[in-house]
Image (cartoon, rainbow, N blue to C red):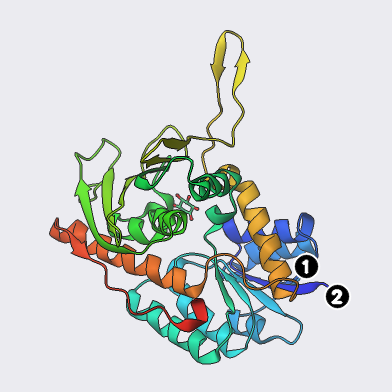
Amino acid sequence: MDLRVGVIGTGNIGTSHALSLHGEVSGASVVGVYDVDADRADAVAQEVQADVYPSPEALINSAEVDAIVIASPDDLHAEQALTALAAGKPMLLEKPLAPTVADARRVLDVEVAVGRRLITLGFMRRFDPGYVQLKEQITTGEVGEVLIVHNVHRNASAPYGLLSDRTMYNMAIHEFDISRWLIDEEFVAVQVIKGRPGPQTPPGQFDPMIVMLTSTNGTLVDIEAFVNAHYGYEVACQVVGSLGVLDMSDGSFITRTARNVRGQSIPDLWLGRFAEAYRAELQAWVNAARGRTGPVGASAWDGFAATSMAEAAARSIGTGTRETIDLPVRPALYS
Ligand code: ISE
């Protein structure tokens, strides 16, 4: 029998997940949707032939729903995750795990008490063919020991009008997670360097910013976080090893030569750049929720660690100094 999925939030990413579950992913059907905007929920429900629920709680607790996709605004993630944990249902929870470390800790503690990994965090880059190759090639050791990771993350314009500190939780958080995953280390300190604001930067905000991270092993990681890059959406990563360099510029786009021009089209949004990552992430999640595999993707612990990094980085925007990242001992559930 198909996994019966309920989707909370039918904005950009929730709609994309619902359509992908309906049309691309096997072993699942979307049976319910909820959105604060009833018309938006209706439109998606009609497309995937699902019911519209009156509240997130009604959807999570429905006997017709086996598993939940939570794609609501960032500050609602923790509460909805706690409701789904109480119902004992597996969930694909969009990042961030929570808007504060204290809230993230509450969710983590409840999952540990439940004793089962019900949360998969939506860090889809772990399923992106480019990042997967980077990880494989780091693991073969061909470029030697990883010494530096340079990350670039640019939005055409600030998504959801993000303020600088929330940029760390919503946008740079992808680099916090992917850097941990790539080098398999935790981070102990972070410093944010604020540059001269570009002409598109609203008053009082900082953009672009360079985030500098120090890992437990002394590996250097930097992130260019630029949310008003204007020209389009772009993500890149370069890994400098003791014997060579791995470069993932935009590996997933075709170079086109025509009419005396050679180049690539740049998407406006991440949905195009990471389409395959989102699809693969959903398929892996469905397989795991159906019991075909063990847990896959990022865990609540990964979400907690990334939120801790975001909170320290947001502090550093204010203080201008290096801030420490304090992580507790990783619970055995995540070893
Ligand atoms: C956005 O919120 C996302 O989650 C996307 O995955 C990311 O690439 C984008 O830059 C964020 O702002």
In the rendered view, would you say 246 is above or below 316? above
Residue nearer the viewer, 28 or 298: 298
Tell me the quadrant of the picture where the N terminus can be found.
bottom right
Does label 2 point to a residue whose CB lies under 8 Å from ligand 1? no
Reading the image, the residue beneath label 2 is: 1
Q: In this view, does 153 lie to the left or right of 116?
A: left
Q: Is residue 109 visible?
A: yes
Q: Which residue is drawn at 39% across and 37% down?
A: 243
Which is nearer the N-term, disc 2 or disc 1?
Answer: 2
Residue 239, picture quadrant? top left
Amino acid bearing label 2: Met
Q: Is residue 43 visible?
A: no
Residue 260 coordinates in the image, percent (x, y): 57, 8
Q: Which residue is drawn at 43% across and 32% down?
A: 231
In the rendered view, would you say 103 is above or below 261? below
In the rendered view, would you say 334 is above or below 195? below
Residue nearer the viewer, 263 or 132: 132
Element marked by disc 1: strand
Reading the image, the residue beneath label 1 is: 28
Q: Which circle marks residue 246 in the picture?
A: none
